[in-house]
Image (cartoon, coloured by chain):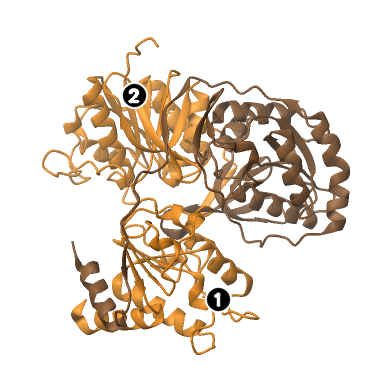
């Protein structure tokens, strides 16, 4: 393979404040800086913002990166929508003419990155967890829902790499500085890139939290608490205790600040009856957004506590990026005990979580 | 008001999630060990898209659903025996490799080439459905690329709901960070929707639907044209199973109080 003279562009966007970069964007900046330094090649950073001062202000926080700074700004980019975001990213890519485009794997950019790669004649790989290589670029990603790990290379350029959130530290600048106040004059040279917007057929009308599960999903929480189907099965007294399970779980989430995940079987129960079923009682606050595993999400949290799950492979693939794993299960032979968890407590989760809630609520937590 | 919709669902087939997967080297690059012997199912998120499409078509009489699927003919036939009983559709088969190691750009090109030649498809009525990610490659890009090739600039990913309005516009809920949905209103078809789970349960098997579908499935499989998927410069440098097998400490015969105390200490560790 002929050696390629690389140049790197990192695509970023401002957060809801309009004046700072989103966390996932700052993570992508770190990935871009690391790669540019390793290959000793030029780096550009493109910022998409809702107004010119905001985008420029966000770009100011990047001045220490030594990168060429480009910005696209305007009211049209206040909200994420395919047509505008794709046009903005395309304009930044054409202006930067980079061979490698690093893109944060946030919902906003995951929606458009492939389309942009197509428009500029490039290729894309997503869910990148690491970017390596010293003479050439190598990217790590998982296949089959986190069951096989591959390292890949590409000869085609431009090559877009959509970097998974949480895989790189967020860029903070040499002294941890962030953007200066928005009203300060901008002395940094930020190139404003013009964008030709297509006709608008889509209007973003807002953001909605699912009434039942919205507040139980906390991506920044240290702990992922996972509820399995055992919570709604018959307990040792021969009775169902779905209401008690719901209360214990919600109390624990409140006291610990954990994020709630669930197995597919339990979520399916909730979807079917949202209350008492024929033989089981579902947990009414669960939706498919809580589901982790083969057909759900693969969240990144430092710790994970599984309760009443059996540790089956399709479910456990959702735990791939949980560093420390513990489980409470009545079955000492369950999948968790076979090398999937660090600690398995063979115990009744109802009793353990009730006691844990008592400790957390008594101030000992 | 009812809309006449032409819904094309792109759906691949994947190994049954309960199967153990092992990497292997095939003649064309990386593969799964015993790949052709593994039982297969319709890709789960794409299956959600199919059920939503069938539901939408049923609510809008005169609408039509095509299921465009790329995979080995023998495997497609096996999977369709089950899928055919769940929703009404017309199968359009493309004979190609199974598995997640093919390049998404090449897959998208093969799908787009097939879609543009579908007899009777009216592009201005088109809703292009599929899973927002597959359970094989899991890249979440194929549908976007097909949409771009078809010139569709209204795309939605991680969709859990679509609701049509009287004026032909529709509201879409897309998953975003933090367990929330972004709500958008699109003026109307054409559009691309990459589905997450949606809100529908898996339909029960309906033998009558199955019989009707099967009349078209076998001819569609016979007519399946082969797809040669280019690598587009993609090179696999390594492929491996995750190495970390944890040493599990099993705690038996501890009281709930003792376990809770240990868990609390663990939660408080920095």
- Residue B77 is drawn in which quadrant? top right
Q: Position of residue A125 (x, y in %)?
A: 45, 32
Please name the residue that numbered disc 1 is placed on: A282
Q: Is residue A265 above or below residue B243?
A: below
Sequence order check, earlier mark of 1 and 2: 2
Colour chain A is painted in: orange
Question: Which subunit holds the residue at mark 2?
Answer: A
- Same chain? Circles 1 and 2: yes
Label 1: few (<14), some or many (≥20) within 10 Å?
Answer: many
Q: Which part of the image, by quadrant, shows the C terminus of chain A?
A: bottom left
Q: Is residue B39 visible?
A: yes
Q: Is residue A118 left or right of residue A15?
A: right
Chain B drawn colour:
brown
Of the numbered discs in the image, which one, if any, rests on residue A337?
none
Tag 2 residue:
A137
Residue at 50% from the left image edge and 90% from the top image edge = A237
Above or below, comparing residue A117 to residue A357 in the picture = above
Taking the view exactly as shown, the residue that stands out farthest to the top is A2
Secondary structure beneath label 2: loop
Left or right, B10 with reference to B176: right
């Amino acid at each position: 393979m002929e050696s390629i003279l690389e140049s790197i562009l990192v695509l970023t966007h401002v957060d809801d404040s309009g004046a700072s970069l989103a966390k996932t964007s700052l993570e992508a900046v770190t990935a871009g800086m690391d790669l540019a330094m390793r290959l000793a090649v030029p780096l550009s950073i493109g910022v998409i913002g809702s107004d010119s001062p905001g985008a420029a202000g966000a770009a100011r926080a990047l001045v220490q990166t030594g990168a060429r700074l480009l910005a696209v700004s305007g009211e049209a980019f206040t909200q994420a929508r395919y047509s505008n975001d794709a046009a903005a990213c395309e304009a930044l890519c054409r202006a930067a003419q980079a061979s490698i485009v690093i893109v944060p794997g946030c919902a906003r950019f995951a929606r458009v990155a492939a389309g942009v790669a197509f428009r500029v004649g490039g290729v894309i790989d997503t869910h990148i967890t690491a970017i390596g290589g010293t003479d050439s670029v190598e990217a790590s990603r998982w296949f089959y829902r986190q069951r096989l790990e591959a390292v890949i290379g590409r000869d085609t350029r431009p090559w877009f790499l959509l970097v998974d959130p949480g895989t790189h530290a967020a860029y903070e600048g040499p002294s941890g500085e962030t953007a200066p106040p928005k009203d300060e004059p901008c002395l940094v040279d930020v190139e404003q890139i013009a964008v030709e917007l297509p006709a608008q057929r889509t209007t973003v009308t807002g953001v909605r939290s699912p009434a039942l599960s919205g507040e139980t999903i906390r991506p920044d929480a240290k702990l992922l608490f996972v509820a399995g189907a055992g919570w709604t099965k018959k307990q040792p007294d021969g009775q169902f205790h779905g209401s008690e399970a719901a209360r214990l779980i919600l109390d624990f989430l409140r006291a610990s600040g954990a994020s709630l995940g669930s197995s597919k079987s339990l979520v399916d129960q909730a979807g079917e009856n949202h209350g008492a079923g024929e033989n089981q009682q579902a947990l009414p606050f669960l939706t498919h957004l809580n589901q982790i595993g083969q057909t759900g999400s693969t969240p990144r949290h430092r710790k994970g506590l599984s309760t009443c799950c059996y540790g089956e492979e399709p479910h456990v693939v959702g735990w791939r990026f949980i560093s420390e794993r513990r489980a409470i299960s009545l079955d000492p032979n369950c999948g968790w005990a076979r090398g999937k968890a660090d600690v398995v407590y063979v115990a009744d989760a109802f009793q353990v979580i009730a006691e844990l809630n008592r400790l957390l609520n008594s101030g000992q937590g | 008001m009812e809309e006449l919709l032409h819904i094309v669902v792109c759906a691949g087939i994947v190994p049954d999630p309960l199967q153990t997967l092992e990497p292997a080297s095939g003649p064309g690059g990386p593969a799964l060990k015993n790949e052709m012997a593994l039982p297969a199912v319709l890709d789960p998120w794409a299956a959600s898209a199919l059920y939503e499409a069938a539901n939408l078509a049923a609510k809008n009489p005169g609408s039509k659903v095509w299921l465009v699927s790329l995979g080995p003919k023998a495997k497609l036939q096996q999977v369709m025996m089950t899928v055919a009983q769940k929703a009404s559709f017309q199968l359009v088969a493309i004979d190609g490799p199974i598995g997640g190691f093919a390049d998404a750009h090449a897959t998208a090109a093969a799908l787009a080439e097939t879609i543009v030649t579908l007899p009777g498809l009216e592009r201005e009525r088109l809703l292009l459905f599929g899973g927002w990610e597959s359970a094989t490659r899991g890249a979440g890009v194929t549908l976007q690329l097909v949409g771009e090739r078809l010139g569709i600039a209204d795309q939605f990913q991680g969709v859990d709901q679509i609701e049509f309005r009287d004026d032909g516009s529709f509201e879409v809920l897309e998953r975003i960070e933090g367990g929330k949905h972004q709500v958008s209103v699109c003026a109307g078809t054409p559009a691309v929707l990459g589905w997450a789970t949606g809100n529908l349960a898996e339909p029960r098997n309906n033998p009558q639907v199955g019989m009707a579908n099967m009349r078209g499935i076998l001819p569609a499989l016979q007519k399946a044209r082969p797809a040669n998927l280019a690598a587009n410069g993609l090179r696999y440098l390594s492929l491996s199973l995750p190495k970390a097998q944890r040493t599990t400490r099993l705690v038996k015969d501890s009281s709930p109080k003792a376990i809770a105390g240990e868990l609390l200490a663990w939660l408080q560790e920095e």
